[in-house]
Amino acid sequence: MALSEASGGVLAEPVTAPVDLPPFDNSAMDGYAVLATDVAAASETSPVSLSVVGDIAAGDQGAYGIAPGLCARIMTGAPLPGGADAIVPVEWTDGGTAKVTIRRAATPGHYIRRAGEDVTAGQTVLPTGTRLGAAQIGMLAAVGRARVLVRPRPRVAVLSTGSELVEPGRPVGPGQIWDSNSFALTAAVTEAGGVGFRQGTVGDDPREVLTTIEEQLAHADLIITSGGVSMGARDVVKEVLSGLGTMRFEKVAMRPGKPQGFGLLDDRVPVFTLPGNPVSAYVSFQVFVRPALRALQGLPPAPPRTVRARLSVPITSPEGLRHYLRAELSTDDDGDYRVVPAEAQGSHQVFALASSNALIVLPEDVTELHAGDTVDVLELP
Ligand SMILES: Nc1nc2c(c(=O)[nH]1)N[C@H]1C(S)=C(S)[C@@H](COP(=O)(O)OP(=O)(O)OC[C@H]3O[C@@H](n4cnc5c(N)ncnc54)[C@H](O)[C@@H]3O)O[C@H]1N2
Ligand code: MOO
Ligand SMILES: [Mg+2]
């Protein structure tokens, strides 16, 4: 695909450099290309004067040769002229254009960026399986690649279940709410390197739910549903998927995100049935689905994105549950991490989630913490 579209993708080929980087010896500074021997004795008290043969700008071809007593004015990135073996920065000179006075000595190689000192021709610059972030995209462009092979991104079907749900943009009637999970989870899929296909909402009708999921099996690499997995009389997702494939429904010792379901359908397609409460669905995605999406892209497990931060206020936590609290992570005046838990921690309270940039992760055995205690904090993407 075109390099400009490859950001976030995973390389499906090793990329080697067709040329050296830098491709030619060039100047690291705006200054003068000289023979080091000419300026070896230059100092404030006994400056050296050289004749300037001309200017060499970045992009120029080597028109000049430097012989003893001569130099060229040169710009950063411009090719080193033949004969020259050192660059004197303009700050060490009087800046002259016909003649220049140099007040400091330079040794051979001074401020010269050598051909191949970054990358040598034939070197693998990025191996297969590399996730293409900004630096890697820049690397590919630097070796002249306009197109690159990337792995197909996992195709993820995202489905909200619930008869109360209405598509944003349509009017809500009594008892109804707008569907936010299918939008949030589709966006989360994109953030995690997948391609989300938002299937919108289906009502709490067993047949409708099953048919929609079965339709997605044909072309999805992963399916995410939200809602309908707890204890309610209308929690149909659990009802229709239990016993299918390897599906299992469990209560997980975490808050939020207690009711969860997972399994493979058709022996191939992982299905995550996330709880319906919007904060629960979002946190469950970060904890369970995000790592799965990495694995589907052939990436190794991500290093933990947690930092240690000092709590701003005391907090309590239920024993036996891993507790993910929405929070604002920042640095204090000393540059240390500080974390403020949101006041609203209900799993329906989307405002607190949208105002947070991190989750405090409290282990199962922690029940009480004081202001100033240090906690693990997971930075949100
Ligand atoms: N008796 C019990 N009741 C509940 C338990 C329990 O253990 N025993 N667990 C609670 C927990 S914890 C959670 S989490 C929820 C999970 O519920 P479901 O997965 O069955 O989800 P629903 O019942 O369909 O919806 C719950 C809640 O979330 C709202 N929702 C659902 N989908 C969306 C959406 N796409 N966009 C916005 N909001 C959505 C829905 O309207 C409900 O308010 O169960 C507890 N109950
Ligand atoms: O465990 Mo539920 O996910 O808090 O609302
Ligand atoms: Mg329910």
Image (spheres, rainbow, N blue to C red):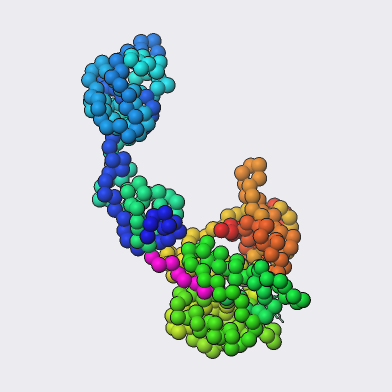
- Please provide the residue range marked out in magenta: 151-158
Name the image quarter holding the N terminus.
bottom left
Q: Determine which quarter of the picture holds residue 132.
A: bottom left
Rendered location of residue 99, percent (x, y): 33, 14
Q: Is residue 251 visible?
A: no
Identity of the residue drawn at 36% across and 51% down: 140
Residue 57 vertical position relative to residue 152 in the rendered view, above or below: above
Identity of the residue drawn at 64% across and 72% down: 167
Identity of the residue drawn at 27% across and 18% down: 70
Residue 122 vertical position relative to residue 186 in the rendered view, above or below: above
Please say whether residue 115 is one of the residues in the magenta stretch.
no
Q: Determine which quarter of the picture holds residue 350.
A: bottom right
Residue 321 vertical position relative to residue 63 in the rendered view, above or below: below
Q: In terms of depth relative to the viewer, which is nearer, 6 or 236?
A: 6
Q: In terms of depth relative to the viewer, which is nearer, 304 or 70?
A: 70
Name the image quarter holding the C terminus.
bottom right
Residue 156 vertical position relative to residue 103 in the rendered view, above or below: below
Identity of the residue drawn at 50% across and 82% down: 215
Question: On the rendering, which quadrant does ligand 1 occupy?
Answer: bottom right
Rendered location of residue 317, percent (x, y): 70, 66
| Residue 212 appears left or right of 278 | left
Rendered location of residue 182, percent (x, y): 60, 71
